[in-house]
Image: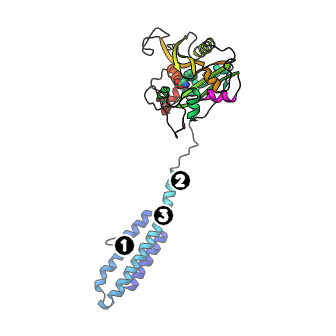
Amino acid sequence: MTEKIKQLVDKVKELLEKASSVAEIGDIRVTFLGKSGEYTGLLRGLKDVAPAERGTIGKLINEGKVRLENMIAEKEAYFRKKEEAKKLASEKIDVTLSKGYLIGSTHPITKVKNEILDTFIGLGFAVKEGPEIETDYYNFQTLGIPADHPARDMQDTFYISENILLRTHTSPMQSRTMLSEKPPIRIVVPGKVYRADDDATHSPIFNQIEGLCVEEGISLAHLKNMLEIFAKSTFTKDTKVRFRPSYFPFTEPSVEVDISCSMCGGKGCRLCKGTGWIEVLGAGIVNPVVLENCGIDSKKYSGFAFGFGIDRIAMLKYGIPDIRLMYENDVNFLKQYK
Ligand code: PHE
């Protein structure tokens, strides 16, 4: 019996040496250790062994079985690893192999922003940027909006701490610039702004462009002329501009600026709700109090300021019905603006 055990173990060893795949090793396992396998048969033969030797022989058979199982498992793991590596190599995708390159396109907001900035650069404005995380002081207080001012309701935002917030408009760059530069000042400030709003025409994050001009003798007439040039170059040559009285704490007088409807040309349609006009921006003459707060002599200098949403202009220009489309970054939407 002892001899038989040794013979079978040697035989399995030899077969394992020759085997070259997981499948072959599986066959060896079944042939020897399966239910009716050759080695398993030894245990059945145990009943013919003299009772006195049964214990010893039984132990030997079990030891041999454990050895065989270990040998088989080891070889099997070796071939499994080898086969997996081979499979991975054969399924490898060559990402450098390309059937032509997909060329990206400028985001509609960036496109419109660049066009508008170009217009203002042509009018002598410098482009400036400012912090998106602002202090309450610059975002509100220097602009004539103290803590209890009702104008704060219109611009509810996200607070980082009691005095630090995500800016609600690009206007804080008005005071930041006037505090650090002397007139003449002509700047445009593009950038992201934030408000606690979310619907088809309001996004919690959107983009504005602020304009500020402080020189001697600046009036509403200069503002209107600049905005007319902006409207005609952004939309069409026949675009008209009109001012309506409005209120902003940092401009006096303040105006709401409408342009003739970009879809119907002023005849009245769905977009302009039949009025022929579309409201696009807020503006006005810089409040003398703001000038003085920033150390600028309001007897000598005056200025105009305006601010508008780039997103809104892009929506009007391209007929985009929902502002949120511009922030989803769906390639199928974006590639239309190539
Ligand atoms: N900051 C104002 C807003 O976001 C717009 C504005 C800018 C109005 C400059 C007047 C002057 O609503």
Region in magenta: 156-180
**Residue that carries the numbered disc 3 in the rendered image:** 79
Crowding at dot 1, Cα within 10 Å, few <14 / some 14-19 / many 20+, comes out as: some
Quarter of the image that includes the N terminus: bottom left
Please report whichever mark, 1 or 2, sits nearer to the chain's N-terminal start.
1
**Residue that carries the numbered disc 1 in the rendered image:** 33
Tell me the SS state at disc 1.
helix
Amino acid type at circle 3 is Phe
33 in relation to 106, above or below: below
At which x and y percent is residue 219?
63, 13
Residue at 42% across, 82% down: 6
Q: Is mark 2 within 8 Å of ligand 1?
A: no
Tell me the SS state at disc 2.
helix
**Residue that carries the numbered disc 2 in the rendered image:** 89
Crowding at dot 3, Cα within 10 Å, few <14 / some 14-19 / many 20+, comes out as: some
At which x and y percent is residue 77?
47, 65
- Cα–Cα span, label 1 and label 3: 19 Å
Nearer-the-camera pick, 216 or 114: 216
**Number of numbered labels in the structure image:** 3
Outermost residue toward the bottom? Answer: 52
Task: Tell me if I can see residue 310 in this picture.
Answer: no
At which x and y percent is residue 252?
57, 18
Amino acid type at circle 1 is Leu
Quarter of the image that includes the C terminus: top right
